[in-house]
Amino acid sequence: MPCTPFPCGGAGFFKEAPGPPPCAGAGTWAEQAAGLADRLGPVAGAAILTPALHARCRDLLLDGTRWDQPCVYVHGDFHPRHLLSAGSRIEAVIDWAHCGAAGPWLDLARMDFREPGSQRAMLDAYFPAGIPADTPQHLANHRLLYMLLALVWEYECGGDWLHERVPGIESALAAL
């Protein structure tokens, strides 16, 4: 049975939004990406990102055409350790603490980020009628977005391994 993400109202992660699901906040996924651009300011101010790197990330986040897509319910931290399986059959997906309403590419990019060998199976499940031609661009956009989200979350929580995230962000930018 193919995995079909279902649409939901609003955009954003439930842990950051007031009110109960399915309302994940106001606006569209593009507006949420633009909001992340604002949240990068303090990270750049703390000299975690160079001014040039901050400007490039901000410009990409503010480019609404990269994020213009309907929101679906996403896991938000999708990787193999959160899959329970029996053989090749996935039995359950656990740890929904980062779930929310986002572009469907976010979970796919996260899975690709951790386990590139799983990418084809995931894409086949999400797109049983055929994988879209613009898949590499969407995955690159959302891989960068996920890394920026992780950086901002780490910064906002007072984390101390922020600089270690920068090479991954630079690598994601190189793929765009």
Image: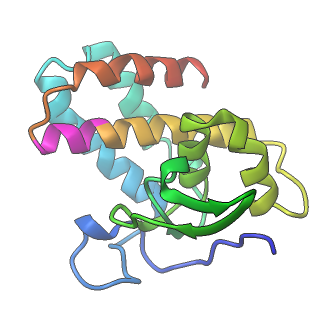
The answer to whether residue 128 is above or below residue 165 is below
For this orientation, the residue located farthest to the front is 87
Name which residue lies at 41% across and 83% down: 22
Q: Quadrant of residue 142?
A: top right
Q: Main secondary structure of the magenta part?
A: helix
Query: Can you give x and y, in whole percent of width and height, for residue 105 in the image?
Result: 60, 52
Give percent across and percent down for residue 19.
Answer: 24, 83
Would you say residue 125 is visible in this rendering?
yes
Is-magenta flag for residue 153? yes
Q: How many marks?
A: 0
31, above or below 119, in the image: below
Q: Is residue 34 left or right of residue 109?
A: left
Q: Quadrant of the C terminus?
A: top right
Q: Position of residue 72 (x, y in %)?
A: 56, 70
Q: Residue at x 41, y 68 (%)?
A: 100
Q: Position of residue 63 (x, y in %)?
A: 49, 41
What is the span of residues highlighted in magenta in the rendered image?
A: 151-157
Which one is nearer the viewer's eye here, 143 or 176?
143
Q: Quadrant of residue 115?
A: top right
Q: Is residue 154 above or below residue 82?
A: above
Residue 161 falls within the magenta-colored stretch: no
Q: Is residue 63 above or below residue 163?
A: below
Q: Is residue 2 left or right of residue 154?
A: right
Residue at left 21%, top 77%? 18
Asked if one can make out residue 79 in the rendered structure from this viewpoint, the answer is no
